Every structure is written in structure tokens, then in C-alpha cells.
Image (spheres, coloured by chain):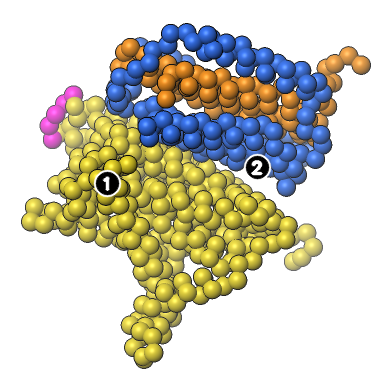
Chain colours: A blue, B yellow, C orange
Amino acid sequence: MTQEITFWVLAVIAVLGALVAVRRRNLIHGVFALMIFFAALAGLFLLLLAEFIAAVQILVYIGAVGILLLFAIMLTERVTGDDARDITSRGSFWGWVAALAVLVFLLLPAIQSADLPQTTEPYNPSVKALGQQMMNPYVVTLEVLALLLTAALIGAVAASQGGEKKKEDADDA
Amino acid sequence: MSLELIKDILLATVPLLVIFPSLFAFTTWMERKALARIQNRIGPNKIGIPCTRIGLFGLGQPAADGIKMIFKEDIVPRGADKLFHLLAPILALIPAMLILCFLPLEFPWGKFMSGQVQAFLLDSAVIFFFAISGLATLAIFMAGWASRNKYSLLGGMRAVAQMVSYEIPLVLSAVVVVMMAGSLNAKEIADVQTGFNWFVLTPWGLAAFIVFFVAALAETNRSPFDLPEAESEIIAGYFTEYSGFKFALFFLGEYIAMFAISGLAVTLFLGAGDGPFLAVAPWLSVVWFIAKIFGLIAVMIWLRGTLPRLRVDQLMAFAWKFLLPLSIFNILLAGMSHHVTVAYPGTTAQVVTWTVSLVGMYVMAKGLDKISRSTAKPREYLYAE
Amino acid sequence: MTLENCLILGAVLFCIGLLGALTRRNAVVVLFSIEIMLNAANLNFIAFWRFSDNPAVLNGPLFTLFTIAVAAAEVAVGLALVIAVYRHFKTVDLEQLDTLKEE
């Protein structure tokens, strides 16, 4: 029963957080709403007994991605973070239609009530087991991921300052 | 919610909520006294027992400060974002309080409660600690941004850049201990170190401890890394526009975060509650734990009285060009030493690995120091001599 | 808390993300809409794993871990691109970034 209530509370927080994040004019408020959404999702992961994933969710999304987004906004918008122009794009009507259509499409199987498994095994995975499975069937994925992250790091540095640097060098010469 | 569970939750949380804020009060007094001694002053010495002339070395000062803080006017700038201005100090305090529960403080009444409510028994307690302590960064940004004050914003952005940079060496130096202990569980890490098998007593543990402590200083915005609140440059940084109780909350949050991160250093490197006479009186483990935290805090205060503040470029170069490569190299050394000692058990192998590690770390540190020195030249004035 | 509820929540969150990506004109907001969609997918992974016959096989959490890592890389590169675009055009308004379009 407690689980049920917690689930619904977190679900409502997540949906509201996501809605505010995508529709709020003030971008800084938007990012903080997004973080509430991430936190609610971390709570849901905890509820589903994926405790390590919840920790990683907080560490990566709130601690790193959120801060990055804040930095990007501070670098590209005015300080108050208000999106001064019209915030909705041209043809946003079709955006609403498409989003609602996808929602209906995704919910159709649920309305038809496909026979989904109803019970859970009360199994709490240890971090050790997670690490072992990551090393056994998924080791190649892990290596590829490490490569991807390195490439992303170099790419991000190159993209964000490469062009500017040359200009400065030219000025110096 | 059964009565049993409520009792357990109270037993788990109330001690933390009582012990650490009172330690905070004592620490502010201790810090002021110590700084005064370093600067050849006396420090607070008047306030003792009210209505008498008994001074008690000024021990009443924290209480007087607290009363003053509560009764001060709460000022919110007209242009400020009211909601965020209010939320920031609260958000600064909550994560600091939360991470206290991941420290393996084993109170004597621990055996009366179920393991369910003891967060340090979680399988990934150390990861949770780092994840939640990262939230403090957000509070600081929020405070700096919501104040609508240039100095606040500058201080906030400085703090965010600093904390994000120093989090990486902090986590990487903890990785060494996690590798050695083979667990992310705070209790298990503490248990591995019983009987003076402290990780700080190994070469890689010592190096990791030093990196961890330096990064922790930066993470809690302590001197010499207190650029976000450099009063000679940007007034008080992100809490320029805070007064009264909100300011007190920031202050409290900062000190609680200091206790928490020192507590993690004690857990990871200094053997948690390990110490003499534990066989006679097991309850001493809490005392040892808090005594070790106080030792680290004393070092922090001492550094504050001694070291000048860094420049921004020095700060960033130090994190990315010195601490980060050093901690990665340290992980490499620790892993290699572990495998060598497993493959060739015996004293010879151990002596060889220890010597190699110590020499390797020393050479690496020297070399990195040479490379990472800031290249900034003395400032050239355009319109002044 | 049945699997059905988790999946419905995932679908709703995914569509909110989609809505943001399709209707906002700020590039940063589009990026965080994509994050919302990825998170909705993560929720589904975890839910399917929790309600599977054999939760000892940790495919769900591992996939989620990999998604989180990929998302982090994506955000880093995406924001670097946004900043590069801002340097060049002095705006991150997606409606105005149409120089490739035929006039």
C-alpha cells in the first residue's frame, strides 16, 4: 500500500516536472523543474529496487547534466534566463498533434490490456552482481562506451572552442 | 507505518540531527579561537554564563551568534527571484544533512534497530554519498542566480566551476579505496580496516588521502580554495544578498558539509571507528570516529589561518592538470600493486611494490607540478604604474 | 505499482519530451526534451527487468547504465554544438538557424 502511494506521488511529480521543464518560459526554472523530474525518476528506480541505478541517475543527471545545462543557458541567454521571444516554434500545432498521436499510439496496447506479468520477484541485485555481469557478457559494450565518452569529451572541447582559438591566434600574429 | 519503523527512524536520525549541529556550534567557536591565536589575538572571550562575569573562554559565543542571526531582518532584493531566493539556503542544508547518514557511525543503540533504516548498510552507500553531496552545487548556483546581483552571480558561477572540477579527483581518489576494499558499502569498507589496517598506511592510500583532502577543501569552499566567497574580489560571493536566518542556514550547511566530507575521509582512509580499547568498550568507536573528524577539521582551520587564496587560473590548472592525472596514475599503481601481491605473496614483493609506488608517485607529482604551473605572467597595467 | 502503470507513466513522459522537442524553438530546451525521452525509456527498461521472470539477469539495469552514459556524452556534445552555434549566429533560436534552407 505504501509502495502504491509512493509510486503515484512520484509519478505525479515526474509528470509535472517534465511538463514545467518543457513549457516554462524561464529557462533556469525549466532546468530546475527538469532536475525535480530526474529526482522523481531516481525515486521510482529506488522503488523498483534498482538502487545503484538510482544513485547513478542522481550523480550523472542532476550532478552533471543539470549543471552543464545551466552553464549552457548562462552562456547563451540573458542572465534572468527568460526566453524573451515567442517560445513556441512555427507549426507547433502539428507538434501537439504528433505528440498526442504518439501518446495514443503508445497507450493503445495498454488499453487493450495485453497480458503483462503482474508479480515481481523480491530480488535485490548487489552491486557486485551488476559489476560481474558488466564484465562478462557486456565487456565489449563497456569498452565501446569508454571510447565513446572519450570521443565525446574531445569532440565537445573541439566544438566549443576550436573555431574561436584560431581567430585569437590570427589576432596575435 | 508501524510503530516499530517509526522508532527505528527516530533512533537513526535524531542522534545525527543533535550531534552534528551542536558540533557545528562548537566548531565555529574553535575556529574563531584558533584563527585568533594564529593572528596573535585573543578571539571571543566575553560571552559565558549570562548575568555573571564568568567568561568560560567565550564558549557562549555560538549561542549569542545564533540568537543574533534569528532576530536579524530578512532582506530580499527587489529584483530577486523570490522563490529561488528562499529555496537556495534550504537546498544547501538538506543534502549536507542527508549525506551524514551514509557515514558508518555505529551508535551503541544500533542493535535495537533493524538494518533497514541504516543507510550506510546500503550496497552502494559511497556512490550515494557523492551523488547527494553534488546537490550542494545546485544550491549555490540557485543562490547566486536568484539574488540578481553581479557579485552573487560571479561567486555562484565560480563555485559551480570549482565544485564540478574538484569532484572528479575526489571521486577518483575514493575509487582506490573501493578497489582495495572490493565494496561500495561504507560498513564493509570500515570493517576491512579494523586492527589498524587503515588505507592511509599504504602508499597509494596515502597519496589518495592527500588528493582527497585537497579536493575536499575545494569541494567545501574552504581556504585556500575559498574563491567563491573571496571578500576582496566579489564581496561575499553567492550569499552577498542573504541576511538573517537564511545566511545562518548557508553557514550551517557549509559546516555540516565539512563534517560529512571529513567523515567520508575518515571512513575511507582513517579506519572509520577503529582505534584502541575497542575490545573493552565498543561504544568508543563513535568517539574515535568523531575525534578523527575533529582532527581533520583542525587541519582545515590551521590551513585557513596559514595559506593565501589561489587565483582562478591556478585553481583550475591545479584540478585538471595536477590532481586529475595524479589520481588516475594512483589508481593504476594501486591496481598493479594489488595484482602483484596476489600473484607473489610474501614480504619481498610487498617491499618492492611499496617502494615502486612511493617512488612512482613522487616522480609523477614532481613532473606534473613542473608541467602544470600556471603560465600567467605578472599583470601589466595599461593606465597605471 | 504494476508493470502496466510503469509503462503508462513511461509513455506519458516520452510524449511530454516529444512535445517539448517539437514545439519549443530554443535549442537548449530541445536538448532537455530529448533527455526526458531517454529517461522515459530508462524507466521502461527498469520496469521490464523488475517484472521479468528472472531478475537475476541484470540486462535492464545494465542497459539503463549504458543509456545514461550515452545520454551524458550526447548532452556534452550537444551543448558544445549549441555554444558553437551561438558563437557564430549569436542566437540559439532554431527558427532563425535556417541558412541551409533555399531562399
What chain does badge 1 belong to?
B
The residue shown at (73%, 47%) is A80
Q: What stretch is highlighted in magenta?
A: B343-347
The residue shown at (73%, 28%) is C24
Image quadrant assignment for residue B203: top left
Q: How far apart are marks 1 and 2 (CA)?
A: 40 Å
Image quadrant assignment for residue A22: top right
- Do discs 1 and 2 share a chain? no
What chain does badge 2 belong to?
A
Residue B245 in sight: yes
Judge by depth and name the residue closer to the eye, B171 or B118: B118
The amino acid sitting under disc 1 is Leu
Residue B370 in sight: no
Position above or below: B277 against B351: below
Instruction: Say which element carries label 2.
Output: helix
Instruction: Say which element carries label 1.
Output: helix
Left or right, A129 with respect to B137, comes to left
**Mark 2 nearby-residue class (10 Å; few <14, some 14–19, many ≥20):** some
The reply to whether dot 1 and dot 2 touch (C-beta < 8 Å) is no
- The residue pinned by badge 2 equals A29
**Mark 1 nearby-residue class (10 Å; few <14, some 14–19, many ≥20):** few
The amino acid sitting under disc 2 is His
Position above or below: A145 against B196: above
Residue B299, position as x, y percentages in the image: 36, 61
Residue A74, position as x, y percentages in the image: 68, 42
Judge by depth and name the residue closer to the eye, B368 or B290: B290
Main SS class of the magenta portion in the image: loop
Left or right, C98 with respect to B130, comes to right
Nearest to the eye among marks 1 and 2: give it: 1
- The residue pinned by badge 1 equals B3
Residue B90, position as x, y percentages in the image: 51, 54
Left or right, A169 with respect to C48, comes to right
